[in-house]
Image (cartoon, rainbow, N blue to C red):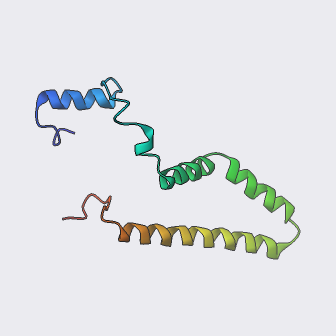
Amino acid sequence: MPFRATSLSHAGDYLRALAFAANGDAARWHVDLFANPLVVTALAAAVVGATPVAAAGWARLAAATRDRVPAVVAMRTAGLLVLALLFVASCVRMAAGTYNPFLYWRF
């Protein structure tokens, strides 16, 4: 923040905005500017992943397939496959885009 501000008043405005004390223009910066399908999908996945919904689903599935060892192995393999596909898809999306979030990418 100190490196981005051009003056002391600009730094104060920046800090007020961080503390939600700035006067924003709701008509200019509405939610539709930021809520595209990718963001909404990521938020939905984050809510499911951050709550016990996913863990409860896995526990229920494990309880249903308790006596069948191959089903448990298949369930674990499917979970790892989904994670691997998500990782590859995120790498492809990051490589295809022009914006790269890594701080030291240019150095």
Q: Nearer the viewer, residue 29 or 41?
A: 29
Q: Is residue 47 left or right of residue 94?
A: right
Quarter of the figure that contains the N terminus: top left
Is 6 above or below relative to 22?
Answer: below
Q: Residue at x 55, y 72 (%)?
A: 84
Residue ranking furthest to the front: 27
Quarter of the figure that contains the C terminus: bottom left
Residue ranking furthest to the bottom: 70
Residue 68 is situated, as x and y percent measured from the top left of the image, at: 86, 72
Residue 46 is situated, as x and y percent measured from the top left of the image, at: 56, 50
Residue 103 is situated, as x and y percent measured from the top left of the image, at: 27, 57
The quarter of the displayed image where residue 93 is located: bottom left
Q: Is residue 12 left or right of residue 100?
A: left
The quarter of the displayed image where residue 104 is located: bottom left
Q: Residue at x 73, y 69 (%)?
A: 75
Residue 37 is situated, as x and y percent measured from the top left of the image, at: 51, 54
Residue ranking furthest to the right: 67
Q: Nearer the viewer, residue 49 or 92?
A: 92
Q: Residue at x 68, y 74 (%)?
A: 77
Q: Residue at x 75, y 74 (%)?
A: 73
The quarter of the displayed image where residue 65 is located: bottom right
Q: Nearer the viewer, residue 92 or 31?
A: 31
